[in-house]
Image (spheres, rainbow, N blue to C red):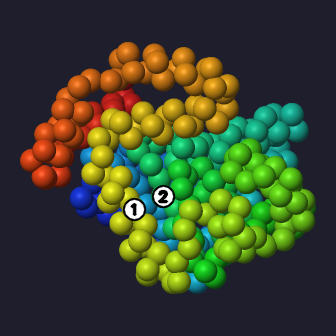
Amino acid sequence: MGYTCFDVTESDHIAHVVMNRPDSFNSMTVEFWQELPAIINEISDRGAARAIVLSSTGKHFTAGMDLGVFTNDNALTGDAEVEVGRARANLRMTVLHLQESFTALEKARMPVLAAVQGGCIGGGIDMVTAADMRYATQDAFFTIQEINIGMTADVGTLQRLPKLIPEGLAREFAYTGEKLSADRAYELGLVNRLYDDHASMVEGVLGIAATIAKKSPLAVMGTKRMINFGRDHSVQDGLEYIATWQTGMFQPGDMLESFAALSEKREPEFQDLAVVNRQL
């Protein structure tokens, strides 16, 4: 299937989702917000991929929200013919819809690895903070641009970034709109690894995804679910959840295959995740 804002390929259990509008700095158009969750949900539901790499093209990873979104069908500005309370209720629904576009990365059954070059601006931070891991080139930078244009970031940055770096520093970047350099992002733990250039980064991140893809997809799915759950719950809640999860999800097949592969000096072969049918 063809997309306006993305190229999607899948090989060796790795799905590679690439933003493909470099001349527009991969700004987030109306089509972007429709296509991204559809792509991620389809990959997750089909279950053949075991890791998703999200990368970009051109000088910058993304310039953030495209200005056209602010005027599309009056979704964000309101319709003069609609009573103000009703228009504002629709705005709330629009914001929740935009949030879900990035929450899809968090809900995906397999890990999402974001590879960032150049500027990761505004909505770009909302997006990559919803990914499992982030990687960057030496020239990358991150900017919470919303404060610089007179608005409060509303699609995930303010909720997720303080869970990834110290809260005081997240507040500083959110209040000032100053650039967070790749070196500083790495120092703070927002970025896992730095690369000299875009090509070596994509190659390196695909390599990390390949390592993940060799593991039991059910075990990786459970691991992702537990880490996400533990972020917003107590340790005891997390222990209760994993105990319940294991009661249903832990089966010996993948473990036995891992042991057999180790003894036979070969790579283990695991069954893909089962297809999810959203039509039911």
Residue at the farthest left position:
264
Please tell me which of labels 1 and 2 falls first in the chain.
2
Percent across and percent down for residue 21 are 52, 75
Kindly identify the residue that appears in the image at 51 percent across and 32 percent down.
226
> What residue does disc 1 label?
208
Mark 1 or 2, closer to the camera = 1
Horizontal arrangement in the rendering, residue 12 relative to residue 179 (left or right): left
Give the quarter of the figure containing the C terminus. top left
Q: Identify the amino acid type marked 2.
A: Leu
Horizontal arrangement in the rendering, residue 161 relative to residue 269 (left or right): right
Residue 59 in sight from this viewpoint: yes
Separation of marks 1 and 2 at Cα, in angstroms: 9 Å
Q: Is mark 1 on a helix, strand or loop?
A: helix
Percent across and percent down for residue 216 are 29, 41
Q: In which quarter of the image is residue 1?
A: bottom left
Q: In which quarter of the image is residue 127?
A: bottom right
Disc 1 packing (10 Å; few <14; some 14–19; many ≥20): some
> What residue does disc 2 label?
113
